[in-house]
Image (cartoon, helix red, strand yellow):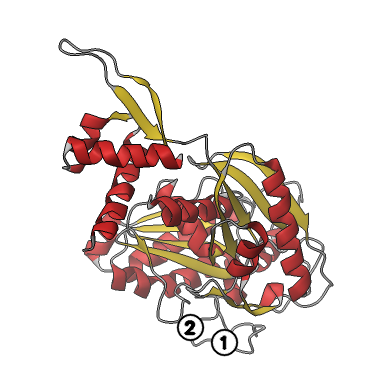
Amino acid sequence: MQPSHARRQNLSLALQALYSSGPMSRADLARSLGLTKVTVSELVTALLDRGHAIEVGRSTPGRMGKPSILVDVNRTGLQMIGLDLSDHRALHGAVLDLDGTVVARAQRPVLTDDSVIGDGSTAGPDYPAGPLGGERAVDLVLELVAECLALATAPILGIGIGTPGIVGSDGVVKTAPNLDWRDVPLRDIVASATNLPVSLCNDADAAAHADHTLGDGGDDLVLVKIGRGVGCGLIVGGRRVRGAHSAAGEIGHVVVGTDGGRRCRCGKVGCLETWVSAPRLEQAIAASTPDPADAAPHADDVPDAVTAAGERLAIALAPVVAALDLADVVLCGPAHVIVPALVESVERTLRARLFTVENATLRVRVVEDPNDIVVRGAAALVLLDQLGVS
């Protein structure tokens, strides 16, 4: 390893230790990293000079010696911008500190024409369909970034963007039908407009990053994001799985079962998206909920369609969970469609299809804050790309 690479790695290790453990003295940090005090002192000086770390006071004096100066990540003195482009109703942006706390918010409404949504049903006021329009979508993203920059109260470390569609490692959105994008170099466009580092990934990948870095997720998980479509993010061994074509987790158009189903917008019949999309679940729940004010159907009223949706999702997930030996299955989506009956159906079907060893540690859960998970995950990508913190 070249000296410059070793130094970069040690800087990331120091930031990771501080980010995970909180304020530490230089001596404690040296012991934690297994490096000499001289080396760590040089690393800390570099981090202080860059503004990535700050001194935060002194430790409580012990029996021997004077108190030590404590060092920590510059958690509030630097900020990040996170964008969520996955909501068909609006593009969402936020300014966050390095702990992932939202400092300010902004959004740009998305106006679309009525047409047919992915599961074959007619779009309504809550789920209008029809593409936003490629160039207009890019313009809205740039407007949203500009507003977030104006709302920032500290230097910006970088901009993270979670977008629907397939995103290449080169920062190009290969395809995002809901935004009418194909081969859009979004990372370079935003970087050129702001002169800031930009991190870009699929929205489900961003959500998985948020759960892993800033939430309750472990190092081996699959997060399923349910919205207008269905996608998932995979974390294996603490790292995001991208796949050979940057399309890992694109399960929405996997056909589940051989017993037919609805025709999908992609032309196939029985795609997972036609069973588990938020519009389809909303229709099923609304049909069984006499009072529109009810947040969710009563247990006795849960329609077969909700249970079937959970079963189909589990059918698609079971081989993935088994092949990668995952311990954590996380569901993310609008709270009014991720009802207990859906979660129970997913878990019941998974346990019925998995080997006993996998069953022993399997956890199926729902994210606590689905509304901010993509912007927080996009910000977590900035932490990883700019500071090496995960």
- Residue 257 pos. (x, y %): 48, 83
> Is residue 210 something one can see in this rendering?
yes
> Is residue 301 something one can see in this rendering?
no
Q: Which residue is most to the top?
A: 63
Q: Which mark is residue 362?
A: none
Is 357 placed above or below 80 here? below
Q: Amino acid at mark 2?
A: Gly
Q: Amino acid at mark 1?
A: Gly
User: Could you say which quadrant of the image residue 159 lies in?
Assistant: bottom right
- Residue 301 pos. (x, y %): 63, 56
Q: Nearer the viewer, residue 273 or 248?
A: 248
- Residue displayed at 35% across by 75% down: 319
Q: Which mark is residue 257?
A: 2
- Residue displayed at 77% across by 51% down: 292
- Residue 349 pos. (x, y %): 41, 66
**Alpha carbons under labels 2 and 1: distance apart:** 7 Å
Are there few (<14), some (14-19), or many (20+) residues within 10 Å of tag 1? few
- Residue 389 pos. (x, y %): 38, 49
Q: Secondary structure at mark 1?
A: loop
* Residue behind mark 1: 260
User: Could you say which quadrant of the image residue 183 lies in?
Assistant: bottom right
- 2 and 1 marks in contact (CB < 8 Å): yes
Q: Nearer the viewer, residue 256 or 252?
A: 252
